[in-house]
Image (tube, rainbow, N blue to C red):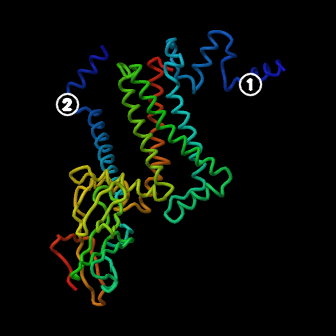
């Protein structure tokens, strides 16, 4: 059995993916991190107290984990959901009562979304209380605030998609709030967001595109920068 | 030494080939970027809206008895007929955050279910967070005796439709 593993690790296929040997010496242990796409952003040295679980509570990692859950469940929900006025509500009902595991996936998407807002907020509190916003990390705090806003916007844009009474009035009230921006700017923001003057077909499609493409892609790019800066500053 | 001679060359003439090409290229990219930004902005703003028309027929006058307030749900407008018989059209969209208000006949008020704003049947704010009175729309009578409301034209409280 052991020799089977050793033959696998020595095989050309394995060595083409992992060029260094098994992490048995300090050198190969370091190489295992440096030459791995997912691990290479780790800092070369980490302070012992920042590895301690009760220092970070893993809240940033949890936020990212929830984002992955939301991406996967969201992509699956997209297969049965059509963002159009006659279909959206019934597709949502079908997901709940007709599609196998549809109810489970929709609920998972919903609860992960609620949890992500809470966890991102707790992460912000933790960073505040440990003073981790201080120089040289002040710009990463700014990126984090933008990511919090994106998290809330993702929740808000997802709110319209079931196309029920809650959704309709939630978006009516929200876009009317945007209208309160003075000098006619608010009216333009509301018009562009809704693609018209009322919460209708155009608004549904616009919120769908924002929810499923624009905001997740923008958030992913910012997360890349956010994590990279955390690692370069010696965080985990 | 080589560096120095390069420096002298570029200082010698004001318009170097590199500077010229950079300016032309950068300028072209700038124009394209600005143009794309304008075009994208125009693209995002729809030209044709398939929304319900602002002018609509509310029905024949005999549908509305004197001293009645009737909500036209589709158009979100109250057709108000006063005791004396004249008509007015009051918007049913709350001026606070856009919820649809209801007529409470026992209290004789228009009430918003969302945040508790209250209006009288002329549309004036009685209480609640609503910052402005409900707008009143122009009303006419067409040849078939149908009431026509134009939500594109707002009128003051003094404008009524006598039938």
Looking at the picture, how far across and down is residue A186, in whole percent?
Answer: 27, 52
Toward the left, the furthest residue is B158
Q: Nearer the viewer, residue B80 or B18?
A: B80
Q: Nearer the viewer, residue A59 or B93?
A: B93
Residue marked by disc 1: A12
Q: Nearer the viewer, residue B49 or A48?
A: A48
> Regarding mark 1 in the picture, which secondary structure is present there?
helix
The chain letter under disc 1 is A
Q: Is residue A132 above or below residue B93?
A: above
Q: Is residue A81 above or below residue A61?
A: below
Report how far apart the C-alphas of labels 1 and 2 lie in the structure.
60 Å
Looking at the picture, how far across and down is residue B127, in whole percent?
Answer: 25, 57
Residue marked by disc 2: B14
The chain letter under disc 2 is B
What's the mark number on residue B3? none
Looking at the picture, how far across and down is residue A34, in whole percent?
Answer: 57, 19
- Rendered-image quadrant of the N terminus of chain A: top right
Residue B25 located left or right of residue A89: left
Residue appearing at x 51%, y 42% in the figure: A113
Residue appearing at x 28%, y 34% in the figure: B17
């Amino acid at each position: 059995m052991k020799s089977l593993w050793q033959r696998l690790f020595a095989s050309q296929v394995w060595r083409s993916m992992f060029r260094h040997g098994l992490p048995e010496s300090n050198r190969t242990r370091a190489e295992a991190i440096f030459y791995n796409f997912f691990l290479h952003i780790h800092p070369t040295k980490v302070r012992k107290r920042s590895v301690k679980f009760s220092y970070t509570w893993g809240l940033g990692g949890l936020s990212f984990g929830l984002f992955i859950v939301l991406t996967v469940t969201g992509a699956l929900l997209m297969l049965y959901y059509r963002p159009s006025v006659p279909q959206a509500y019934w597709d949502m009902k079908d997901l709940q009562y007709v599609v196998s595991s549809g109810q489970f996936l929709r609920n998972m998407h919903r609860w992960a979304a609620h949890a992500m807002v809470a966890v991102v907020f707790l992460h912000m509190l933790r960073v505040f209380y440990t003073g981790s916003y201080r120089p040289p990390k002040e710009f990463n705090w700014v990126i984090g605030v933008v990511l919090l806003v994106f998290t809330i916007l993702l929740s808000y844009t997802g709110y319209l998609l079931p196309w029920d009474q809650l959704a309709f009035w939630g978006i009516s009230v929200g876009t009317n709030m945007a209208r309160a921006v003075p000098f006619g700017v608010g009216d333009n923001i509301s018009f562009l967001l809704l693609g018209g003057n009322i919460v209708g077909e155009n608004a549904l499609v616009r919120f769908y595109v924002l929810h499923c493409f624009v905001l997740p892609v923008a958030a992913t790019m910012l997360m890349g920068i956010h994590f990279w800066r955390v690692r370069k500053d010696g965080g985990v | 030494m080589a560096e120095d001679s390069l420096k002298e060359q570029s200082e010698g003439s004001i318009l170097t080939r590199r500077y010229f090409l950079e300016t032309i290229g950068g300028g072209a990219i700038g124009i394209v970027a600005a143009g794309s930004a304008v075009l994208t902005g125009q693209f995002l703003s729809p030209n044709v809206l398939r929304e319900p028309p602002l002018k609509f027929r509310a029905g024949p006058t005999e549908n509305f008895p004197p001293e009645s307030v009737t909500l036209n749900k589709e158009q979100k407008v109250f057709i108000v007929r006063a005791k004396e018989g004249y008509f007015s059209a009051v918007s049913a969209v709350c001026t606070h955050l856009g919820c649809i208000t209801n007529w409470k006949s026992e209290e004789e008020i228009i009430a918003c279910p969302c945040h508790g704003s209250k209006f009288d049947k002329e549309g004036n704010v009685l209480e609640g967070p609503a910052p402005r009175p409900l707008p009143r729309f122009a009303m006419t009578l067409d040849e078939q005796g149908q009431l026509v409301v134009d939500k594109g034209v707002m009128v003051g409280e003094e404008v009524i439709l006598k039938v």
